[in-house]
Amino acid sequence: MDFRKQKRSIAEAKEMDMVQYLSSLGHEPSKIRNNDYWYHSPLREENTASFKVNRKLNRWYDHGLGKGGNIIDFGIQYYGCSVGEFLKKLDGGFSFHEPLKNISKIENEPEHPLKILKESELSSNALIRYLEQRKIPIEIATQYCREVHYELNAKSYYGIGFKNDSGGFEIRNPYFKASSSPKDITTIKNASDEVAVFEGFMDFLSFKSIRGNNANNTPDFVVLNSLSLFEKARPFLESHKSIRLYLDNDAAGKKVAREALSNSKKYKDNRNLYQNHKDLNDWLVHSGKQQKKRLGNKL
C-alpha cells in the first residue's frame, strides 16, 4: 500500500464513530452516561460492562485489560491483525455514509427527506460482508431484502433495504440506520394461526437464520420497524390464536411485552430465550453452532 494513501486512510478511519462501528459488529451499550457509552467488552468475556467509549472524544478504554485508544487500536485488538489488514477490512465502508461529525443532526430528523433512487438485488460486497458480521446468510437476506440506493442532503448512499407494507424502506448499513416514508409495519403471511413479532428486520432475519426455511409449522411474521407501531399491528396480531413476542431486552421492549401480556392471553414473551443479550441478533452473533441448534428447536 502506498504510504501516503495508507496515512490518508488511517486519518479517515479515525473519523469513524466508534459507537456506530461497534453497533455494526453487533455490540450495543449496556448503559449511557452523558458522553460515556458502557459495553460488555467485545475483546473478552465479562459479566459487568467495563468497556467504555467516550463518544465526544471518539476513544475507547477497556478497564479489564487496561488498554484503550482509537478505532484502529481497537481493530488491531479485536481482529488480532496489523494496521494495514484492519484498513483492508474497512475498505469500501466509507461509501456507505460520511463519518459522523455531527451526531445530533444524524440522530434527529434530517432537514431534507430521504429519497429512494433505485432498488436492486443485494450484490454489494460491502453489504454482504456486513450481513456476514451479523451472522445472516446471504440466501436468507436476499429473500426479504433489497439493495437500496438513496439520496440524503443532496448526497447519494446505499444500504440494505427492508420494505414495509406501505412501500417504505428500513435501511441499514454498518454506519447508518434510516427509514424512507411512509413508515409502516411489515407483515409476512403464511396462512398460520400463530404469528411471531420482531422490533426490527435484523431480528426477523436472525430468526429465519436460526430456524432455517423449514416449511413445517411456519408462523406468520410481523416486523414492527418501530415499537411505536405496536398498536397499529394489534388487529392483525390478535387475529391469530398465538402471538410470540421476540422484542429487545431493554426497558422499551419490556414495557411493550408487559402491556401486551396484560391485554390478552394469546401473547407469549419469548425474550427469555436470549435473556443475556440485547436482542435476537446479538444472541446469534455471539452463539456457537450447538447453541444455535438448541435455540432453533425452541423458536
Image (cartoon, rainbow, N blue to C red):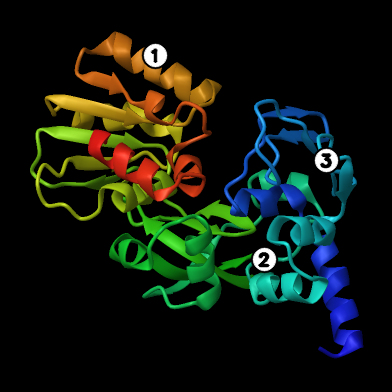
Quadrant of image for the N terminus = bottom right
Give the residue pinned by disc 3: 65
Q: CA distance from mark 1 to mark 2?
A: 37 Å
Q: Badge 1: few (under 14), some or many (20 or more) residues near its Cα, within 10 Å?
A: some
Residue at image x 50%, y 55%? 134
Q: Can see residue 238?
A: no
In this view of the protein, which residue sits in the foreground, 66 or 257?
A: 66
Residue at image x 57%, y 48%? 26
Give the residue pinned by disc 2: 97
Residue 80 location, quadrant: bottom right
Picture mark count: 3
Looking at the rendered structure, the kind of residue marked 2 is His
Does residue 14 lie above or below 271 as drawn?
below
Which is in the foreground here, disc 1 or disc 2? 1
Determine the residue located farthest toward the top in the rendered image.
Answer: 262
Give the residue pinned by disc 1: 258
Quadrant of image for the C terminus = top left
